[in-house]
Image (tube, rainbow, N blue to C red):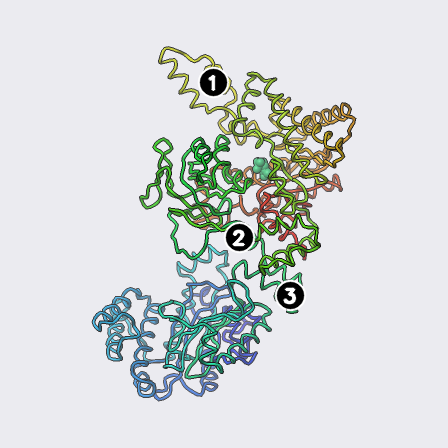
Amino acid sequence: TATSTPLVVAFPDGDGTMAEILGGKGAGLAQMTRLGLPVPHGFTVTTAACREYLREGQEPAALATELEAALRRLEASAGRSLGDPVDPLLVSVRSGARFSMPGMMETILDVGLTDEVVTGVAARQGARFAWDSYRRLVQMYGRTVLGVDSAHFEARLARARADAGVTTDQELSADSLEEVTGDFRKLLLEHAGEDLPQDPREQLHRAVLAVFASWTGDRARRYRAHEGISEDLGTAVNIVQMVFGNRGRRSGSGVCFTRNPATGEPVPYGDYLVDAQGEDVVNGSRRTMDLTELAAREPELHRELVGHLATLERHYRDLCDVEFTVEEGRLWILQTRVGKRSPAAAFRIACDLHDEGVIDLDEALCRVDGHQLASLLHPGFATGSGEQPVARGLAASPGAATGRVVFDAATAMEWAARGEHVVLVRPETSPDDLGGLLASVAVVTARGGLTSHAAVVARGLGKTCVTGVEGLEVDENGRRAGLPGGLVLDEGDALSVDGATGEVFLGSRDVVPSACALAIRSWSHEQARAPYLTHADPTVRSVGRLLAHADERRTAGVRANAETPSDAHAAREYGAEGIGLARTEHMLLGDRRVLVEQVVTGNERAAALARIEELARVELEQVLEEMDGLPTVVRLLDPPLHEFLPDLVDLEVGTAVARAGGTPDLEAERRLTLVRRWHEQNPMLGLRGVRLLAAVPELVTVQVRALAEAAASLKARGLDPRPEVMVPLVADVCELTGALTRIRAEVDDVATATHEAVRVPLGVMIELPRAALTSGRLAEEVDFFSFGTNDLTQTTWGMSRDDAETSFLAAYRESGTLATDPFSTLDDIGVGRLIRLSVQEGRLTRPTLGLGVCGEHAGDPDSIHLLLAAGVDYLSCSPPRVPVARLEAGRYAV
Ligand code: PEP
Ligand code: MG
């Protein structure tokens, strides 16, 4: 509470656990002071002071007194005082929130310089140094405290460089800097109506309040909204004695890591710049030396630095990054924190720390996550080309691919057949495009979200896909597309698509396959107990070890969504323990679409049904064979019917044209009548899933018969097929029982006919709110539930999974109305609540009820923990996501 939390804490009085009130940076400085590292003296004004200031609109009553006391203690320990004209104390004032907010940092350096002090500094340390410091103070104070636009200062500096005929500020003379400082002061007066205070304590005080106020600036707010950081935290402010890296050859500044943050290699890594301040190192204007070079030039210094790095790593038990400065030969550590790292480094560092005895395997597993693993599993573009994307959309299916642009499925197939790599660019995709999708290396759509048709199908196929590309306008007939910025894309142009970032590039780029994915798949074929241990790449080895540990720990099962033999094969290689969803309608896309049309419209219905049964029998048998000994959940046909019927408008136009030409097309008119009969305004809420039974009951019959026969034939061959059947889009128990009766009858018939009894567990998908709400009743009828979180999200929110993204969801995220997309991360308090209710009521009725999830959320690291906490038994996701789900289920269990 405000009364018990101090407003100011000196570094020696704090520690690393106090980040909540000291901010990340302040806690780090306090901890390093405790560890005896050479940290400049200083203190932190706490987040509690900031919160009170923001809440009350004025600073806490005791702040001025506490500041003064802390300052006196600082002056005593530093042996210098603020405002002393001979040997002054100068301080930096910097924001430091609980969570790092890069680029949001407010900094005012060299606080304490005044007209009087600057002459003293000039006498002792040289005029150039003194005036350069003074102009920095005026500039930063002007910008941060008085709100003067930086552009004014930049313009004045540019003029000074031009006048002196030099290109960098370092080359400006003392005189020139003195003149610039005077002009900066005029800018303050002109734009803010006040000058830099000549009382150093006033400078300090105002700087602290300005940092408080920066918390509510536009930039900071937007950043927090984007990162999901709470508005209420407030920032701490660190006041630290200045040390200078720009005092000649024996001074300098650097940034380093306790080990390599890109590769994870356990060797300190960093950059050092002689005669420079911290920002010179990061802005890359001068060539830095690495730590090896530093070791050669300044062995003493290097040894000391490396010693401190080891102390920090021992304390934090993790990779740390460090900013340091050397002032006339003396090393100062200015900042530390647990460092950011690449996904590859994260795995390697976690395992290395375990091998070094620092952390146990459970903790190592918690140090990595599914997002990092996902990014290691798909191919990527060779890095370092610096290429800029020409458009951006949603990262719908990861991977990286380059190919020539085509705008329709037919061209895609034609070009692919002659060996071209093609990228299919569409306004959106429909099942008609399947052939084109299969033929392409990547798909880009102007519309659609993460669960749109293109996205779901592409993920299933492991194809790179970017959907909802802003500013993409596809002119299919003109065979060209407009891109943001007036760029035009013609058929045949080369395009590169990064499905992991949603970026689209003009031209070709080199694609490199994922070593991790190749390795994981190959391990599944090896007999050795832990084949990953011998892999040459330490990152891949670490991935293997942590995945194995996750498997050992997890209690949840992981299955795959797959319906083709090759996907089933890949799923097993990725470690799937079964199939949780075979979308049978995917077997009827492309050319086969017309079979569904024929069944529905009654044209050659019997022949079409027979053909569907035959196809299903052959393909399901192959899938069951791939999955021998593992459960395979086959879902009854669930086509939104409109996706399988000819386009109404096309038909209407065609028949009208024929009629106007005097030769009516009677067959087309007959189709038109039938298609009109089945046309729906709102097809996603229409004749789908179990409802199809009302229109075409035979569709269920042939599918179940095909499955049962396929299983019987495998059993006769001595295999162990484990088919299960589930019913989609059920809202009411009577719909379900109707379907189950038919399924059971068919299964029994086949058993009698083949003399092979295969047990077929039956289940229902929970993908409508009403199904969730009546779960107790549904559970009386089935062996398992499978949560279809895509439709459950769509119907709970009442927003279309195909259209919401481009119509308003993107704008919602932009404006902060919604922080995350409920189609990619489970909406815990809405959809999650329905799932929890369903789990409870279902299990109450039938304690042995199986519970799976087969919507896209089952492969999303952030959603997996919520789903497992709700009590589900297994996750089912696209095959390449299976390792991600294994890892996250393991992390959930520890
Ligand atoms: C779902 O709705 O979550 C589901 C798995 O089914 P589909 O995506 O095929 O509609
Ligand atoms: Mg569904």
Question: Where does ligand 2 appear, by image quarter?
Answer: top right
Q: Earlier in the sequence, mark 1 or mark 2?
A: 2
Q: Quadrant of residue 758?
A: top right
**First in sequence: mark 3 vs mark 2:** 3
- Marks 1 and 2, how far apart in space? 48 Å
| Residue in the image at 58% along x and 31% along y | 587
Tag count in the figure? 3
Front-most of 52 and 658?
658
Residue assigned mark 2: 375
**Residue located farthest toward the front when viewing the structure as drawn:** 418
> Residue drawn 52% across and 22% down?
678
What is the secondary structure assignment of the residue under circle 3?
helix
Neighbours of disc 3 within 10 Å: few (<14), some (14-19), many (20+): some
Residue 690: x percent and y percent? Answer: 62, 28
Element marked by disc 2: helix
Which residue in the protein does label 1 denote? 672
Q: Amino acid at mark 1?
A: Leu
Amino acid type of disc 3? His
Q: Is residue 791 visible from the viewing direction of this image?
A: no
Query: Of residues 829 and 489, which is closer to you in this image?
Result: 489
* Residue underneath mark 3: 354
| Residue 95, x across and y down, in percent | 44, 69
Graded by Cα atoms within 10 Å as few (under 14), some (14 to 19) or many (20 or more), the crowding at tag 2 reads many
- Is residue 309 left or right of 759 when viewed as pictured? left
